[in-house]
Amino acid sequence: AQKVTQAQTEISVVEKEDVTLDCVYETRDTTYYLFWYKQPPSGELVFLIRRNSFDEQNEISGRYSWNFQKSTSSFNFTITASQVVDSAVYFCALSEAEETSGSRLTFGEGTQLTVNP
Amino acid sequence: GAVVSQHPSWVICKSGTSVKIECRSLDFQATTMFWYRQFPKQSLMLMATSNEGSKATYEQGVEKDKFLINHASLTLSTLTVTSAHPEDSSFYICSARDWVAPDEQFFGPGTRLTVL
């Protein structure tokens, strides 16, 4: 069975600080996808990134960067120079291949990030 | 990008009544739709998976007679909460995927249900 663990329940930082959100996953599949979503107070999920298990290259998008390490089953997310608007709950999620589980998404428990001015 | 809508965005109802939530894919054909439930300060939990034209597959612990799911067309799935009770109050989110990109899901904005 697949599982996603986000050990950090809440993180509070001051604006302009860098912050890393941790995500550790478990799966028996060799083909899988990892995701990060942002959920602001409005509740709507905002897609941030999707990474497949065969692509271990780290990715940077503006102030966001992701570090995927299969050796430690981790997919961590870093926000550089955080801003108040980054305050939200962030979810890491895992999807196994369609033939394994119908592409069902398993979400971590989420990390509440608060960026204070 | 692919857009998924949900209606209503929020609903308040009396205990014992039934509530229907619609999930629509606006610019693509959704072969599969997923329904999630999220309680306050908790994660999203998958309730059921529905494929167009067939019966939904429910996750363990989800009462299929209470949460009726219909996916009659490639652009519409409905979730009906029958005989709702206060413990059914939650945020319900649907997602949809099409056959072109089966490993991607597009999420609706969610429906907040409050049962009095």
Image (cartoon, coloured by chain):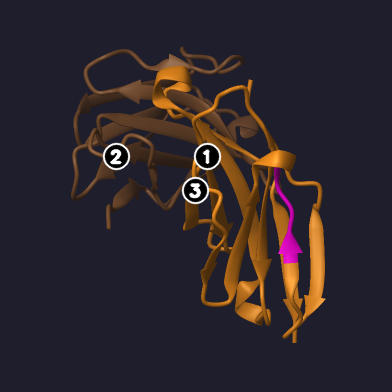
Chain colours: A orange, B brown
What residue type is disc 3 on? Arg
What residue type is disc 1 on? Ser
The part of the chain drawn in magenta is A20-24
Q: Residues within 10 Å of mark 1 (few under 14, many from 20)?
A: some
* Residue B49 horizontal/vertical position (percent): 41, 24
Camera-side mark, 3 or 2: 3
Which residue is disc 3 drawn over?
A51
- Relative to B15, A97 lies left or right: left
What residue type is disc 2 on? Ala
Camera-side mark, 2 or 1: 1
Label 2, secondary structure: give it. loop
- Note whether A43 is above or below A104 in the view shown: below
- Picture residue at 19% right of the left edge, 32% below the top: B74
Cβ–Cβ under 8 Å for marks 1 and 3:
yes
- Note whether B40 is above or below A61 in the view shown: above
Please tell me the numbered disc located at residue B101. 2
* Residue B16 horizontal/vertical position (percent): 52, 25
Label 1, secondary structure: give it. loop
Which residue is disc 1 drawn over?
A53
* Residue A42 horizontal/vertical position (percent): 53, 62
Relative to the observer, which residue lies in front, B41 or A22? A22
